[in-house]
Amino acid sequence: MPVGMLYCAVVYLVRPTTLTGARGFKEMNQEQEREPSFEASLGRLEAIVRELETGNLDLDTAIARFTEGMALVKRCRALLAAAEQKVSLLLESEKQEAVSVPLENLAKERADGF
């Protein structure tokens, strides 16, 4: 599987969360609705690239599309970084859980047939 598709799969499965602090879930959901998802941002970026590659745009439009594309690249990178951080935290948490099980508990579980 290409690395790009792996990142897409990870981002799709492990969506970055926003710390809400004093804000409620309703506010957080409204904020997320305003911001495009990784998939939407990537799709728009791909459309911009195709449009720029045609060479049929006037200079002002091409610069506007390029500027929009750079903002989308920044957003996608931030979303990927957040997803990578979340995956790392999950893996670290799993690693700590595996290490923190006392040996006495393992011996008892084996004796009980678990």
Image (tube, rainbow, N blue to C red):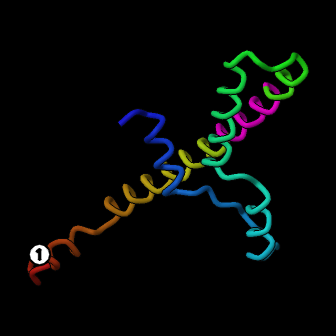
In this rendering, the answer to whether 74 lies above or below 21 is above
- Residue on which disc 1 sits: 110
Q: Residue 27: x percent and y percent?
A: 81, 72
The location of residue 107, given as percent across then percent down, is 14, 73
- On screen, residue 90 above or below 24: above
On the rendered structure, is 99 left or right of 11?
Answer: left
> Residue 49 at x, y = what percent?
67, 26
Is 104 in front, or is 75? 75
Type of residue at label 1?
Arg
Residue 58 sits in quarter: top right
Residue 94 drawn at (x, y percent): 39, 59
- Does residue 30 show up magenta in the picture? no
- Residue at point 65%, 27% (across, down): 50
Quadrant in which the C terminus is drawn: bottom left
Q: Nearer the viewer, residue 84 or 103?
A: 84
Q: Which element type, helix, strand or loop, lies under badge 1?
A: helix
Q: Quadrant of the N terminus?
A: top left
Q: Which residues are magenta?
A: 66-77
26 sits to left or right of 111: right
Which residue is painted at 64% across and 45% down in the image? 79
Left or right for 109, reference 43: left
- In the image, residue 82 sits, relative to residue 52, either above or below, namely below
Q: Main secondary structure of the magenta part?
A: helix
Farthest residue toward the right? 60
At a point 52% along the width and 57% down the height, the residue shown is: 14
Residue for point 73% across, 15% down: 55
